[in-house]
Image: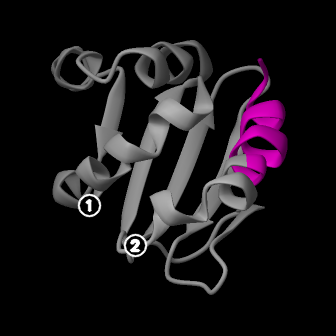
Amino acid sequence: MTGSEMFDEKLPNALEEHPEKFKGINEVFKFVITGEDGGTWRLDTKAEPPTCTKGDGEATCTIEIGLEDFQALVGNLMLAMQFMSQKKMTIDNPMAAMKLQKVFPLLK
């Protein structure tokens, strides 16, 4: 799955089909997906309704990770600490990122 398929299709579909999973998160996430088929997307859970758009901008939490590692992370959240310690992923606001735990299973 490419970054575009994940953030332009799968995540917007999850927003539409499961809006209750995004309620109360109240953060703006910027995903910087590195490598081929990567890009930058913003998930705004403060917006009503929440949105996922391509492009850069202000965020309360920025996550930078390679596409293959991101796909692995979506399938197994336990990899987060490993990826951070191996410098495969950076998160500037880990407390906010933890709120994604209830969202990531929708992206499998």
| Residue in the foreground of this view, choosing between 60 and 108 | 108
Establish if 3 lies above or below 75: below
Q: Amino acid at mark 2?
A: Glu
Element under disc 2: loop
Place residue 107 in its image quadrant: top right
Whichever of labels 2 and 1 marks the residue nearer the N terminus, that label is 2
Image mark for residue 3: none
Q: Amino acid at mark 1?
A: Ala
| Residue in the foreground of this view, choosing between 72 and 37 | 72
The quarter in which the C terminus is drawn is top right
Query: Range of the magenta residues?
Result: 1-13
Question: Magenta segment, principal secondary structure?
Answer: helix
Q: CA separation, marks 2 and 1?
A: 7 Å
Label count reads: 2
Name the residue located 26 percent from the left edge and 61 percent from the top edge: 96
| Residue in the foreground of this view, choosing between 75 and 55 | 75
Residue topped by disc 2: 27
Find residue 60 and report its horizontal and vertical position in percent. Answer: 37, 72
Crowding around mark 2 (Cα neighbors within 10 Å: few <14, some 14 to 19, many 20+) is: many
Residue topped by disc 1: 96
Horizontally, is 62 left or right of 87 in the view?
A: right
